[in-house]
Image (spheres, rainbow, N blue to C red):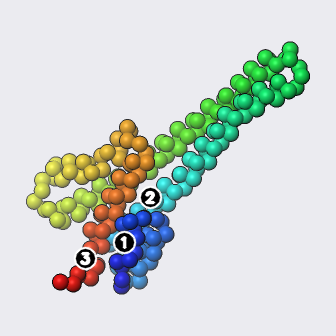
């Protein structure tokens, strides 16, 4: 089983498709589905897939919001061209009010999207914390539990900080997934030649 090329791809440019191929290779090699590397590959795949789908939804909602903002100007232009100047102010106010509500509603949708993304980051951080705990306990059994938790939270914590931009949190969590996966796959790689 030659894992090096797929691992290199996941370390340099992780995608759900690359993780899917890794998962298939690990299954073909007889790696149990409950093995740590399998769990991590699956969780990383889900995280990237969800990020991908949320980004698409975000881009769409931002476009819709921009279209709604443009519609406010369209209503004013329509009223100006109607030739009924005496009703212009009333129409403009009514049109602007309804269009402004649409803009606010779409902005609320974007805020809702950000909340969904934060929930996705929290779920990934939970998984990573658990797996990093297990890895740390295996590699450093003498480390006191309190210190182990502090060290793990130094890695994961910034992604959970509400002041951390979502894109930064996604990059941080993705790097942690990569490092965890690499450490779990290392025993399956052939030894390097001397």
Q: Is tag 3's residue or tag 2's residue first in the polypeptide sequence? A: 2
Q: Secondary structure at mark 1?
A: helix
Rendering coords of residue 64 (x, y %) = 65, 42
Identify which residue is drawn at 38% across, 57% down. Answer: 174
Compared to residue 21, the image places residue 86 above or below, namely above
- The disc at residue 47 is 2
Identify which residue is drawn at 30% across, 50% down. Answer: 156
Q: Which residue is mark 3?
A: 187
Proximity of marks 3 and 1: CB atoms separated by less than 8 Å: no
Q: Is tag 3's residue or tag 1's residue first in the polypeptide sequence? A: 1
Q: Is tag 2's residue or tag 1's residue first in the polypeptide sequence? A: 1
Identify which residue is drawn at 64% across, 38% down. Answer: 66
Please identify, in this view, whether the residue under mark 3 or under mark 1 is nearer the observer.
1
The residue lying furthest to the top in this view is 86
Q: CA distance from mark 2 to mark 1?
A: 19 Å
Q: Which residue is mark 1?
A: 8
Rendering coords of residue 141 (x, y %) = 13, 62
């Amino acid at each position: 089983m030659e894992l090096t090329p797929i691992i290199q791809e996941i370390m340099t440019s992780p995608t759900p498709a690359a993780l899917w191929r890794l998962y298939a290779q690990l299954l073909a090699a007889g790696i149990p589905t409950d093995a740590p590397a399998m769990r991590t590959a699956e969780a990383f795949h889900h995280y990237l897939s969800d990020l991908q789908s949320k980004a698409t939804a975000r881009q769409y909602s931002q476009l819709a919001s921009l279209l709604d903002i443009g519609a406010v100007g369209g209503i004013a232009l329509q009223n100006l061209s109607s030739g009924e100047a005496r009703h212009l102010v009333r129409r403009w106010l009514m049109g602007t009010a309804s269009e402004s509500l649409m803009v606010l509603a779409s902005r609320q949708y974007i805020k809702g999207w950000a909340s969904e993304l934060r929930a996705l980051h929290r779920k990934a951080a939970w998984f990573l914390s658990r797996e990093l705990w297990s890895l740390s306990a295996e590699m450093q059994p003498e480390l006191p539990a309190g210190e182990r938790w502090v060290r793990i939270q130094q890695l994961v914590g910034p992604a959970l900080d509400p002041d951390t931009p979502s894109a930064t949190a996604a990059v941080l969590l993705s790097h942690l997934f990569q490092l965890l996966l690499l450490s779990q796959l290392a025993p399956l790689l052939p030894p390097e030649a001397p």
